[in-house]
Structure formats: structure tokens, C-alpha cells
Image (cartoon, rainbow, N blue to C red):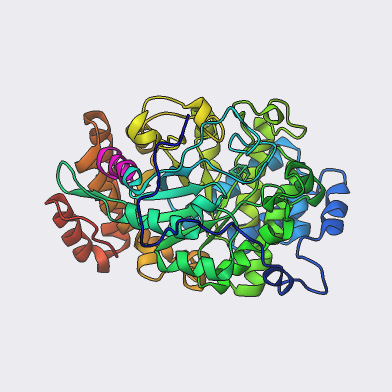
Amino acid sequence: MTLAHTCTNTTRQPAHPPAPAIYPEQIDKYLTGGRNFIDHTAIARLLEVAGEPDPRQVEDILAKSLAVQTLSPDETALLLRVRGDESLERMRQAAATVKKKVYDNRIVTFAPLYMSSRCVNDCLYCGFRRSNTAAHRRTLSLAEVKEEATVLAGRIGHKRLIVVYGEHPRSGVDYIASTMEAVYGVKVKTRRGWGQIRRCNVNAAPMSIEDLAVLKAAGLGTYQVFQETYHRPTYERVHPAGTLKSNYLWRLYSMHRAMEAGIDDVGLGALFGLYDWRYEVMGLLYHAIELERRFGIGPHTISFPRLEPAANTPFTQRPDHAVDDADFERLVTVLRLAVPYTGMILTAREPANLRRRILPLGCTQMDAGSRIGVGGYATRPDADQTDDQQFMLGDTRGLDTVIRELAEAGYITSFCTAGYRCGRTGTKIMNLLRSGAEGRFCKLNAVITFREWLDDFAGPETLAVGEALIAHEIDQIRRTQPKMFEQFMEFYGKTQDGRRDLYF
Ligand code: SF4
């Protein structure tokens, strides 16, 4: 396919955008005695210990998780050794309780929006890698970005996106900022009110502090960079030398630079299947501890995608460290317990039946109605676009179906984006989450945004299930938050009348 679309913004996008670059001084400044914070020797030693741990030790650790305290590497490694059915069941129960305590029955829903499939890197596992000559390459123009946002906000009903970019001069920081601006500018009339994307989270390449400050000014929500694998030899094997991405430390310190740029809302992740999943869990924990120690702010979210097949990408057919469903369940449980305050993102990479099983283990966010082909929402909404995607999706159900199923199971879908707009980020959100107080605002906002979605987008069946759930939630708010109830009902009533974007 030849490139038919180019970015039309002339104010931000220069004719010859600069090539992405690495600034060694923005790595070295964070090292301690020349060393980074992933203590490979310690992780390897902890993972070598064999044998089932004493159930009493497990109970002590679970008590710490239930008090919403981050576990230590020793404690987390011990949970990774649990094999017995009884102890595993205790861990699953505790994980569900932690989630309920910190996030109640809310599930935040979002959609991915892929902006560009051009990439200068050559990651062995990725359909967008530069050596994949079978991949169709495309970078959305701003007009096309608006078309995608119109479908997402006006037809499906999303309020929150994760916008995704390959690493390429044509999708550098100026392009990212322009596309975010285009997304935020779309406002669509709906059945009872209007739809708009209120939060753009960004998944993009590691950047300099200066570029990150540009994204902050453009209204970025969460900045996501997944380390892919924390195991350095594996990292260097799957990211060929000479590519930008082959620099392990530039990627590892992405979040440090983000914090320095004033972005206190960051998302970590690892691509499970590249190396031993237990090592990746430990890597994520070390990363969270490092951010807490240095900035007082842990990750807002942790993602745990599993390696999925991609077109013309042999590496994905038989990965050396493929994670089966049982181990996937264990890793999600241990992550929930190890970093109890963090949001946990369960994506549509996983098939619907597995998502049903994994969600109760403490996940807080999921995408739905997702299309990951570049331009997929507006041009080919009903198809998995195998030659145009980074990988294959496991759950292609529509948002209406997913929301109905969640509501039937007692979960309220939240489209709330109030937190970052009210300054509830960084240390403020950390304190609220650890104390369980964040839920006060979130419950109110979840019900109001759920009302918006039901009135604007729900099919009749989902509307009926949603009404029953919302009645239950309102009754709970009346009982548990009597001081807020009057104002809440005022906002709720206005929302029913077609007002939008009211929040606490
Ligand atoms: S994983 Fe990301 S950086 Fe690597 S080839 Fe794919 S799009 Fe590029």
C-alpha cells in the first residue's frame, strides 16, 4: 500500500521532522554508582529459591497487601513460589479484596487508537518492525485522526483513549501533540447529549525531558512505556543492536524523565512471553519501588500483555517463554498483591473467556470494542486487519456487549476522567488510593458517566441491565455518602437532562 495520507498540520509538524535521538546525560544522571535499579543478581537469587513457602508466611504477606502496602522483593518472590491449591486460593481471594478495597466494583474502560505503523525499530516480536515488508504502513493525517475520534466518541461512546505511535521521525513529539489536540477538539452530538474524548493516554517511544514537557502541555493523561522485558540479555537479543530501542537504559529511565517533565501519571508494563514471567513480575516491582523511592509516586497503572501472534512475524509463533493461562492467572494475582495501589490493565489481547476469569483477580481497567489497525475505527470497523496490526486481538466484542456483561456481574463501567483534571494525580492520588479515600469521588463519577453512556449509546438490553445496576449504586451512595448525596443527585438529574461532563 502506498502512503495516501500525510499530516496536514503546518504549525507544528516541520517538513523534515528530526530523527528520534537518545541523550546519554538523561540516562547517566539517574544511575547510582553506575548501576541501574534492576538488581539482576538479587532477582536471580530470589528466583532460585525452591520449595513451597509456609502458609503462615503467606498470610503475613497478604495482610501487608490488604493494608495497601507495596511488598518487598523478598515477599513478592515468596508469593511467586506458592503452588498449593489452598494458598493460591487465599492469594486470589486477597487480590480480589485488595481491588475491592482500593477500587470498589468500578472498571474503567478505554480504547486504543493506533496513529502510525511506521517504525525505525526492528523488535523481533512486532508486526510493525521495519524489516516486516509485508506490513502496510500508514500514518494518520489530522483529518483522519478526527474521523477516528468521531467514531470513538460519537458512535461507540468512549471517553478515554490510549493513543499509540511507532517510533519514527514522522510520528515524533510534534505529531503526537498535534494528534492529541485533534482528538480533544472533536465534539459529537449524541442521542441525549454530546460525546468527546476527555483523556488521551499516550503509549509512545521513550523521549527526552524536553519532549515530554511538550506532551504534558498538550494535555497528556498517562504516559506509558513498557519495558517489554526487564531481563537485559533478552532485551538485547530481541531488540537488534543499532536500533534506537536496543538501548535498555534509555527505555528503563523513561518514567524518571517523565516525572522530571512534570508528568506524575505513568504506566509500566512488560510483554510477557519474552523471558521468564516471574523475572518480569520482579522487574515491574523493582521499577515501582524505584519510582516510589525517588519521586514518592508509583505507577498509576501496570500492564501485562502476553505475546500474541503477528502477521509475518515468526518469533511470535513459538516464543521460548510463552505464558500459559494458569501462569498468567498467577502473575496477575501476584502483581495485584505486590503493588496494591496501582491500576491493572487487562487488554483485549486476551480472549473473552479468559478476561472473565482474570478480571476478578484485581484488574481495574479494560479496553473494549477495540480496533488496532491504523484507521481501523472509521474505515474497517468490523474486521481484524491482519496485515495492518501490531498483533492479533483476542476479544473483538463490542463495547455494548462488554458493558452488559460487566453490569450483569456487578461491575459498573466508569468513563470517569475527573481525577487528572481535578489535580488528583501523583502523590495526591497515591495517598487517596492507599487510604481508600479515592473511591468516594470515583463512585460518584462512575455513576454519572455510566448514566451518560447508557443514555447516549446503550442498546435496549444493556440499558435494562444498566438501570438495575445504577439503582443499586445510587442507593449505596445514599447510605454511605449522605453528605454528598444531594449534590450528587443534582448532577445526576442534570446528566439525565442531557448535560455532560459534570464531575466531582
Ligand atoms: S514494538 Fe514498538 S518499537 Fe518495536 S517495532 Fe513495534 S512499534 Fe516499533
Q: From what the image shows, is residue 257 above or below residue 88?
A: below
Residue at point 78% right, 51% down? 78
Residue 336 in picture, x, y percent from top left: 60, 51
Left or right: residue 16 versus residue 7 is right
Q: From what the image shows, is residue 165 above or below residue 418?
A: above
**Which quarter of the rendered image does ligand 1 occupy?**
top right
Q: From what the image shows, is residue 313 above or below residue 344?
A: above
Residue at point 45% right, 49% down? 162
Left or right: residue 223 versus residue 230 is left
Residue at point 53% right, 72% down? 261
Which contiguous range is marked in magenta?
146-158
Residue 365 in picture, x, y percent from top left: 47, 47
Question: Is residue 154 in the magenta section?
Answer: yes
Residue 174 visible to the viewer: yes
Left or right: residue 458 versus residue 368 is left
Residue 364 visible to the viewer: no
Task: Tell me the chief SS of the magenta region.
Answer: helix
Q: Which of 120 and 275 is in front in this view?
A: 120
- For the C terminus, which image quadrant? bottom left
Residue 136 in picture, x, y percent from top left: 51, 31
**In terms of image quadrants, where is residue 67?**
bottom right
Residue at point 30% right, 38% down? 156
Residue 299 in picture, x, y percent from top left: 57, 61
Q: Which of 12 and 227 is in front in this view?
A: 12
Left or right: residue 42 versus residue 189 is right
